[in-house]
Image (spheres, helix red, strand yellow):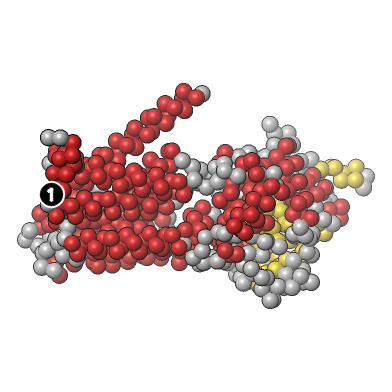
């Protein structure tokens, strides 16, 4: 097999093309949003939120008569936004530490989701789809929804970039400038929720965190300005999406696992090269 | 951006009236504090750890709700006086690993002038570059903020307050954990602010600087113990009351001999 057919062969089916596009979209959007998650130290929140959408996804799934292809976005988004707001509400006074509040909401929602899914006869297969994703099942409509959600998230970040930067870096400045700090923080959490929901079908809930954290963390090793970090993270996210896609096709391994392993390999390589380079300079 | 129409330069730059924070009687950080600072003055707030110096600043900036009292900036209620008050927090409150450059941080001060949903324009970049030059930070503009000395870090935040067009600047412990060179740099930066007519309120453990470099000194320990000219306020009885026996204060006739709070360490 020559090189051209190595790349083109998997793309001969429309549903596989859609899967590939989905992975590119998902890799990019997670990388951008992930930069804010990483610089704010909200990795745990991202993990919790990706699990907390389960009951909403499960309800949509049951409402549509046990059809994975159907629109799970609405339920997932609802559960994600509710979780984000409940966490923000629980921590508005300092009696409860944020990580405790996140943990409680996270496990409650996840358990609720499992309870809902378990009412279905096809319980195991359904749960597997939701946890690990299935890129072969992405319909034209799903892809359009993912693209639309991604466009909205990117637009909001573009429009409010300088405000998000200030509430992430220096709350005292944000307060002294009378920015609507609480509103901006909740909006950022909602953007994380939207990103997770848009990515759910392609990579699944269980491995979501890697897409959100690893590209941004890799970029942070290489540059020390958030603008540059976002560009490099996006590149890493998209490249991993493509590499993961081909690996998944030829090695017959689930796409989510392939992407995450690619991401981790890139991170590991950059980390080693960078510490080697630093030692060399000293 | 024009200054608000209620902004009145003939009013005191900062007026604090019967300010109390926290729950009455229980964990009350500040109790009934009143004072007034004229435009362009420099005031040093001194007091032991836990005296409520940071609390006072945070209340003025709007970071902390207060239970009773009133704060006004040039005659405007502090809750509506956005961007007239600049705040340089304690070093420990900033994440110095955050991926932003010196230029980025100073540009943050422009946000209210730029307005919602817009990017900084050339005018904003010119203002920021000019301020970096004034504070001798031009060569460091692209550097990540963690890669700076203590004095440079303070100057970046002072430049940001200028970018913000703050009329009143609050500095929380600007002289803590900096060497002599940095200390001198910070003092020079403060002199630039004074030339701009900006009112400065800073907290310090450093009684020598408080005495030499300020128009007025405010002694705080939960409540206001004394406020006035340094030579009137920095006297044995007031200092003993504020700091207790921990502060070495000696008098020689009418002269007060102070020892720096950090003397004898190292």
Residue for point 51% across, 23% down: A282
* Looking at the image, residue B207 lies above or below residue A118: above
Residue in front for this viewpoint, A176 or B121: B121
Residue in front for this viewpoint, A24 or B182: A24
Instruction: Indicate the position of residue B133 as horizontal and vertical percent values.
Output: 69, 47
Quadrant in the rendering for residue A244: top left
Instruction: Indicate the position of residue B204 as horizontal and vertical percent values.
Output: 71, 49
Residue for point 24% across, 63% down: A144
Q: Which residue is mark 1?
A: A12
Q: Quadrant of the N terminus of chain B?
A: bottom right
* Looking at the image, residue A207 lies above or below residue A139: above
Quadrant in the rendering for residue A253: top left
- Residue B18 seen in this snapshot: no
Residue for point 90% across, 42% down: B252
The mark total stands at 1
Task: Give the residue at the far right of this rendering.
Answer: B253
Residue in front for this viewpoint, A171 or A274: A274
Q: Secondary structure at mark 1?
A: helix
**Neighbour tally class for label 1: few under 14, some 14-19, many 20 plus, Cα within 10 Å:** few
Left or right, residue A107 beside residue B94 = left
Chain of the residue on which disc 1 is drawn: A
Instruction: Indicate the position of residue A132 as horizontal and vertical percent values.
Output: 19, 50
Instruction: Indicate the position of residue B80 as horizontal and vertical percent values.
Output: 62, 72
- Residue A273 seen in this snapshot: yes
Left or right, residue B67 beside residue B184 = left
């Amino acid at each position: 097999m020559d090189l051209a057919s190595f790349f083109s062969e998997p793309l001969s089916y429309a549903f596989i093309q859609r899967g590939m596009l989905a992975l590119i979209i998902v890799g990019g959007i997670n990388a951008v949003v992930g930069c804010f998650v990483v610089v704010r130290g909200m990795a745990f929140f991202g993990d919790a939120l990706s699990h907390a959408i389960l009951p909403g996804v499960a309800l949509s799934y049951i409402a549509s008569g046990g059809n994975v292809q159907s629109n799970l976005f609405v339920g997932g988004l609802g559960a994600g936004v509710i979780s984000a707001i409940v966490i923000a509400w629980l921590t508005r006074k300092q009696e409860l530490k944020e990580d405790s509040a996140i943990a409680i909401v996270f496990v409650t929602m996840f358990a609720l989701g499992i309870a809902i899914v378990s009412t279905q006869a096809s319980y195991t297969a359904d749960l597997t789809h939701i946890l690990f994703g299935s890129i072969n099942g992405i319909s034209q409509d799903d892809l359009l929804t993912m693209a639309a959600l991604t466009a909205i998230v990117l637009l909001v970040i573009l429009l409010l970039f300088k405000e998000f930067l200030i509430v992430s870096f220096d709350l005292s400045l944000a307060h002294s400038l009378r920015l609507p700090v609480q509103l901006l923080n909740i909006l950022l959490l909602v953007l994380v929720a939207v990103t997770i929901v848009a990515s759910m079908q392609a990579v699944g809930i269980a491995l979501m965190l890697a897409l959100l954290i690893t590209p941004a963390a890799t970029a942070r090793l290489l540059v020390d300005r958030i603008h540059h970090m976002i560009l490099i993270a996006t590149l890493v996210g998209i490249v991993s999406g493509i590499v993961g896609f081909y690996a998944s096709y030829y090695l017959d391994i689930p796409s989510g696992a392939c992407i995450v392993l690619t991401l981790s390999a890139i991170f590991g390589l950059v980390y080693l090269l960078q510490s080697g380079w630093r030692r060399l300079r000293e | 951006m024009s200054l608000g129409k209620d902004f009145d330069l003939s009013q005191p730059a900062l007026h604090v009236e019967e300010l109390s924070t926290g729950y009455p009687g229980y964990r009350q950080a500040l109790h009934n504090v009143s004072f007034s600072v004229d435009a362009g003055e420099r005031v040093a707030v001194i007091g032991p750890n836990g005296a409520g110096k940071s609390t006072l600043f945070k209340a003025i900036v709007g970071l902390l709700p207060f239970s009773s009292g009133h704060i006004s900036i040039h005659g405007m209620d502090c809750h509506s006086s956005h961007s007239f008050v600049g705040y340089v927090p304690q070093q420990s409150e900033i994440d110095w690993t955050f991926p932003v450059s010196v230029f980025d941080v100073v540009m943050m001060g422009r946000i209210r002038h730029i307005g919602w949903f817009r990017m900084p324009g050339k005018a904003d970049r010119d203002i920021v570059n000019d301020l970096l030059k004034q504070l001798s930070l031009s060569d460091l503009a692209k550097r990540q903020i963690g890669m700076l000395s203590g004095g440079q870090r303070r100057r970046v935040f002072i430049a940001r307050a200028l970018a913000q067009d703050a009329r009143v600047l609050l500095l929380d412990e600007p002289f803590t954990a900096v060497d002599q060179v940095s200390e001198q740099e910070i003092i020079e930066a403060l002199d630039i602010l004074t030339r701009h007519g900006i009112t400065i309120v800073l907290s310090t453990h450093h009684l020598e600087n408080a005495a030499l470099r300020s128009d007025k000194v405010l002694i705080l320990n939960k409540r206001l113990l004394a406020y006035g000219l340094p030579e009137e306020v920095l006297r044995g009885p007031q200092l003993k009351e504020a700091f207790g026996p921990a502060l070495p204060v000696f008098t020689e006739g009418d002269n007060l001999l102070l020892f720096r709070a950090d003397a004898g360490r190292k």
